[in-house]
Amino acid sequence: MNVRLTKLLLGLAAPLLALGLAFLITSLVLALAGDPVGAVWSQLLQWPQPRNQINILNNAMVLFLSGLAVSIGFRMNLFNIGVDGQYRVAVFVAAVVAGEAWLPGYANTALAIVCAMLAGALWAGIAGVLKATRGVSEVIATIMLNFIATSLVAYLLAKAAVREEGSNVIGTKVIPESSWIPGIQVWSDVATELYGFIVITVLAGVGYWFVLNKTRFGFELRATGQSATAAVASGVSAKRMTIATMMLSGAVAGLVGLPILFGDSHSYGSTFQSGLGFAGIAIALLGRNHPVGIALGALLFAFLDEQSNPLQILVGVSPDIVAITQGVIVLTVVVSYELVRRYGARLEQRRVAAELAAGVTVAADGDRRDPDPDPSAPSAPDGSRGPGDGDVDLSKETTR
Amino acid sequence: MTTHPQEAPAESGPLAVRLRGIGKRFPGVIANDDINIDVRRGTIHALVGENGAGKSTLMKILYGVQPPDSGTIEVDGRTMRLSSPADAIQAGIGMVFQHFMLADNLTVLENVVLGAEKMHGIGGAARAKIREISDAYGLGIDPDRRVEDLGVGARQRVEILKVLYRGARTIILDEPTAVLVPQEVEELFDNLRELKREGLAVIFISHKLDEVLSVADDITVIRRGTTVATVEPASVTSRQLAELMVGSELPTPQTEASTVTDHVLLEVRELRLPDPAGGRELLSDVSFRIHRGEVLGIAGVEGNGQSELVEAIMGMRPGMTGRILLDGEPIGRLSTRARREAGIGYIPEDRHRHGLLLDAPLWENRVLGHQTRRPSARGGLIDARAARADTRRIVENYDVRTPGIEVHARALSGGNQQKLIVGREMSGDPVLLIASHPTRGVDVGAQGAIWDHIKTARRAGLAVLLISADLDELIGLSDRIEVILRGRLVGEFDPGAVTPEQLGSAMTGAGQDSAGKETDA
């Protein structure tokens, strides 16, 4: 079979397998609880209304950035659980900076975004430095930093906050309207607008792909993730790489809350959306650390969240069922990717063995280890399901 | 020469294992195809073949790790279906792996009973049983010693004892001599002869043909997944045997005329490396020089500081003191990357841990270690097109057998992985090559090719630091040999005058007085 096609099919097989399994397990839970399985799915899986579509995209944007941040760590085998804390610190810093409005208009916005990324990078950098210098597990460090971030931001908010009249809600100063990022009107008859931050989000995705796949830094990051020992032997400084990766992950985490800040809430307050960092872990896993995959994963999660809202009213089932589905997806994704990866590796080894057995190599012939003309030496085993005729493969090799 | 393929040699004693027509489309490098082997009880049966010839696959089949696609396995005359190692153990087949599977911080007794607690318990009965086995086969094992206090040879005997304890009557030994010095090899062979005298069958897998000829009763040669001949050691020479293995004439590591210049390329002065755990220094007072066009061989029993020496020179060991000068320039404080950029090529001893990204395509592996230099990189960007082109060049010039450069490194056989590494490290015109066990686990054909590349580069003025456990390789390639023992250089030898036995003595510290500095012969 065509190699590229095989790879593509394998790549699609894993998420489909995972989703199918998650679908089954959720149905089982519903059935056991005595809830109407069919009704729940028909509500969840119906095509969303225009207003809901925008909500899904907006929500997905936030989840995408969160997944991107986590996956930067994953590419180097670093488990950044601290995206939640990092985005909190960052969005608070951005809200304060933008609210103070030291610069006019969009310069103010740009400054706030840079400050948010810096804040996220520094907060994550703490865990990076601890790991590089003292060997503290980044998992433990980032979890602890999440708690500290929550408390720290709450404490600072109380100092920096302005209380709204007649309300218990406190928040930072509202950002001047000239520094808001305007929404995009998608449907003329729908009031809900798409966050303008989508431009930066797309740039972040493209930047992620470019840095990881095209630059030396990205190569070293991936190499360290695949084999830290081999990377060190190749001249990568593991310590510096750990700190740099954590900081980069934190910088992207710093973007997570910004679509909401600049597009919707315009201030940071006690009601600001929380828990976005943890969803990112699931989405990074689901998206296989690939920007397109992460985008699809974010869309799926946002879709399920949005569609589950009216579940209680229309079907009488708690929307929490969607959280179960999402959780199960993460588990099945991990399992199915591993299964498919092993199957793919076996397939490749078999293909390589078969092509070599057929005497097809890129190497020039005429050396002392030519395919043996001696009849006693076995050539390609009869009836092997290898790629068959050697000439065919040679041509494939040359056209590549 | 005459070979009498397939048929079992002169009948004597019943068959312990009889394999007929074993075939396996194994998801690996080479499939097994029509393997026929008869192992007689009370004999040592050697299995030789190049790496990737299918020996490991066959042994996995016999040990129940993989089921065969075709063919039959008979153990003691009964046809068996072995679908797990537990089945194999049940059938009386035991396996001693090349890499010991022992817990260092447990005693021999604890290691032996681990997983076999039901047989004789974990206390006195087990201890008595171990003593009994040890005495019966002359293994000389004390059940209450801790494994970490044992030498390599003794650990291997513990592995054999583990297998015997579980009732094995047929024992498979996978490259058992790879980790031993010549003296230890002799001891092992005495143990094996003891085993066969007691009526056990031993299947002995090896690369080292002289050893095979000295210990085996029957030798089966495997080439390209099939058994090409079964011979008796008396009727063949090791050269004929090797030619059977390769199917063509074979190379030798003979150095030609010396190309040593008086230009010092690498100078190491008073290198010391403290043990982070606070024990004896890992390297103490190591000083040597390598000239342009010179190969310096380091001989030593594994674990005497070779890895540390290499990693210290590569800048991968913090805490090192002393001076390292490359072409007169001090490099002791530079990072690993800067040292590589200064022209050091590095063939690591463990290619999977230090040399390759197994799940990355070949061309990305070409970039590894060269990610700051052309053709792999331009500025801060990876130049994939140039890296791919250069990978094709390496694949062609170094005869890396692969269907393409996009396959993952994991899919290649060990020898081909190693050729890729050698090709990569030779790129970019290195001035110094550090080669740790460059042909370990590599088949004869690839071994010859790698030797040729080292020799060619040496003629062109490359300085080489060669670390190897293969004494023939050391003697054949080196211009000078230093022996390392417990982190010290303890003797210098002229490879033209030294024998493997003399080196072996120096390596174990036994012959320190007699071998001395500078052999005179």
Image: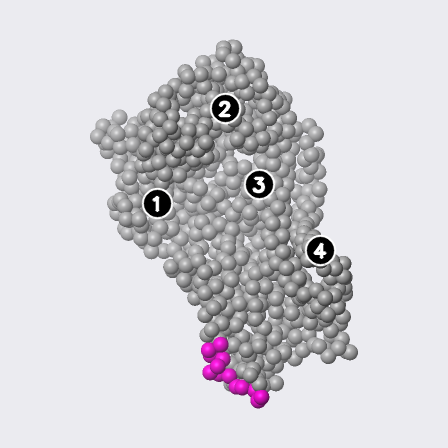
Residue identified by numbered label 4: A31
Report x, y in % for residue A321. Answer: 66, 62
Give the crowd class for mark 2: few <14, some 14-19, many >=20 residues within 10 Å.
Answer: some
Cα–Cα span, label 3 and label 4: 45 Å
| Secondary structure type for disc 3 | helix
Whether marks 1 and 2 lie on the same chain: yes
Q: Chain of mark 1?
A: B
Whether marks 3 and 4 lie on the same chain: no
Query: Position of A248 compared to A25: left or right?
Result: left
Report x, y in % for residue B12. Answer: 49, 10
Q: Chain of mark 2?
A: B
Q: Which mark is residue B92?
A: 2
Give the crowd class for mark 4: few <14, some 14-19, many >=20 residues within 10 Å.
Answer: few
Residue type beneath disc 4: Ala
Vertical placement of A2 versus A265: above or below? Answer: above
Quarter of the image where the C terminus of chain B is located = top left
Whether marks 2 and 4 lie on the same chain: no
Instruction: Name the residue: 32% across, 39% down.
Output: B304
| Secondary structure type for disc 2 | loop
Q: Chain of mark 3?
A: B
Q: Is residue A158 magenta?
A: yes
Q: Which mark is residue B411?
A: 3
Whether marks 1 and 4 lie on the same chain: no
| Residue B119: quarter of image | top left
